[in-house]
Amino acid sequence: MTARNSVAAQAAPALVEGKGLVRSFSRKGGWFSRSGAVRALRGVDLSIHRGEAVGVVGESGCGKSTLGRVVLGLAPLTEGQIHFDGQSLADLSGPALRTLRRRMQIVFQDPYGSLDPRRTVGAQIADGLIIHRLCAPGEVPEKVAALLEQVGLDPVQARRLPHEFSGGQRQRIAVARALATRPDFIVADEPVSALDVSVQAQVVNLFSDLQAELGLAMMFISHDLHVVRHLCDRVVVMYLGLVVEEAPAADLFQSPAHPYTRALLAATPALTRRSSEVPRLVGEVPSVAAPPSGCGFRTRCPHAQAQCSQSIPGLRPVPGAALRKVACHLAEQIAT
């Protein structure tokens, strides 16, 4: 999707829209810990439009995977609302929810653990076709063969078990399984991080080709900024359960507005020419069980001031920049 098309897409209703998303986990106390609730998501707004690839980035534990599961309804919300194509997931149940779920699929991180080792890959790809009655029983083998070809595999391999494939091939099988239900939206949760570097590019290119060919909306969760830059139209940066910056990919990589985004780019070799001018990230991500007061990033931010500890900065538009938002009290000062 080009920048112009991305702007036009934003004017249309979002396919996926989340408002005020909160996901809390109960924590049992022990000898060295207190009981209570841990908020993995602390009020996230998210929108994804048809045909748009949105990258979600941030350090481990920031809430990326939790957000993906919540959006698909795989994990319950504590607070907030999710709408898919104008319908609230909370208002649906039974056949109506099942019909909607067909249009939303996920590709998991681990291609070794996401496939049943005791069933042929063809049978696993066929599950979606059979469950949702997308074709006549006699047409299933032909549809499975076409899906395998679509992801670059030989249809003859449908009779094999998962252990007979390499990691990259297994992830292609997982993609074929997700495509079987003809989805409009796919969550790809770190889909290449468990693969050898030599095959990561092949799988990323597969996602890129399929997204363009089928017009899929996609949430691509990753810690690899090179992949996100190559694949995504827009990027959402998360820190400690909150969105701290959101921007078209080209704008974000060219001129990041949040100090955390700047530090992430600076820590990625060959991604930015200004890496030597930006302080490196120091310290650890604070615990989600006891986040700092005010801005969650202030304990690691070189620009932090007194006001940063007093209130959580809201996500607000960046003046003069279309489709850009930042959650930082000092964003304008830092940019100048």
Image (tube, helix red, strand yellow):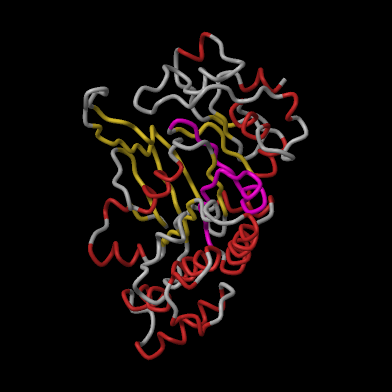
Q: Where is residue 331 in the image (x, y as percent from the top left)?
A: 62, 22
Q: Which residue lies furthest to the right in this view?
A: 273
Q: How many marks?
A: 0
168 up-or-down from 138: above or below: above
Q: Position of residue 128 (x, y in %)?
A: 37, 73
Task: Tell me which corner region of the image, top left, top right, bottom left or bottom right, holds residue 305.
Answer: top right
36 up-or-down from 223: above or below: above
Task: Tell me which corner region of the image, top left, top right, bottom left or bottom right, holds residue 196.
Answer: bottom right
Which residues are drawn in magenta? 216-240
Q: Where is residue 142 in the image (x, y as percent from the top left)?
A: 46, 87
Residue at 52% over, 8% down: 306
> Considering depth in this image, is 155 or 10 the residue closer to the camera?
155
Quarter placement of the N terminus: bottom right
Residue at 31% over, 48% down: 75
Residue at 49% over, 23% down: 313
121 up-or-down from 71: above or below: below
